[in-house]
Image: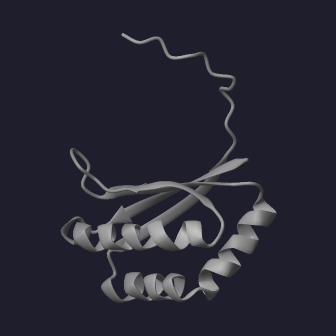
Amino acid sequence: MLTCIIRYEIDPFKRAEFEQYARNWGQAIPQNGVDLIGYFAPHEGNTTTAYGIYNVGSLAEYEAYRARLSGSDLGRQNYEFAKKEQFIRREDRAFYRLSSTPHAKRIPQ
């Protein structure tokens, strides 16, 4: 299992547009077969960094997912929305493998 973390640099005056973009992916990504963890917009501190995080089985599965996503109506509409509104200044995507397992049981405080 791989975790894809997308780091976005967004226009701080278009945070509402980014949040709509995130909600749209909240529908489209799971519908196209990927385990979405979530999209995260700035709340306090840095006003220009946001993240999208999801799990995918392998890079081959990722490529198949991307093809499905770009072929879906909601996926195409969301790409066009981002292009038209230009709230994303930069996007960096990286894949990570969980290395800290097995985790201990959490002790209630």
> Which image quarter: residue 23?
bottom left
Residue under the image location 66 percent in, 74 percent down: 66
Q: Position of residue 24 (x, y in %)?
A: 41, 74
Residue sitting at x 29%, y 58%: 48
Give the side of residue 34 with respect to residue 52, left or right: right
Q: Is residue 61 above or below residue 74?
A: above
On the rendered image, what quadrant is the C terminus found in?
top left
Residue sitting farthest toward the right = 60
Would residue 51 be found to the left or right of residue 94 on screen?
left
x then y, percent, for residue 22: 39, 67
- Residue 13 placed where, x, y %? 19, 69
- Residue 82 is left or right of residue 105, and the answer is left
Q: How many marks?
A: 0
Q: Quadrant of residue 70?
A: bottom right
Depth check: 77 or 11 in front?
Answer: 77
66, above or below 34, in the image: below
Q: Residue at x 71, y 65 (%)?
A: 62
Residue 97 location (% of width, % of height): 69, 41
Asked if residue 109 is positioned above or below residue 75 in the image, the reply reads above
Give the residue at x 23% y 49%. Answer: 43
**Quarter of the rendering containing residue 82:** bottom left
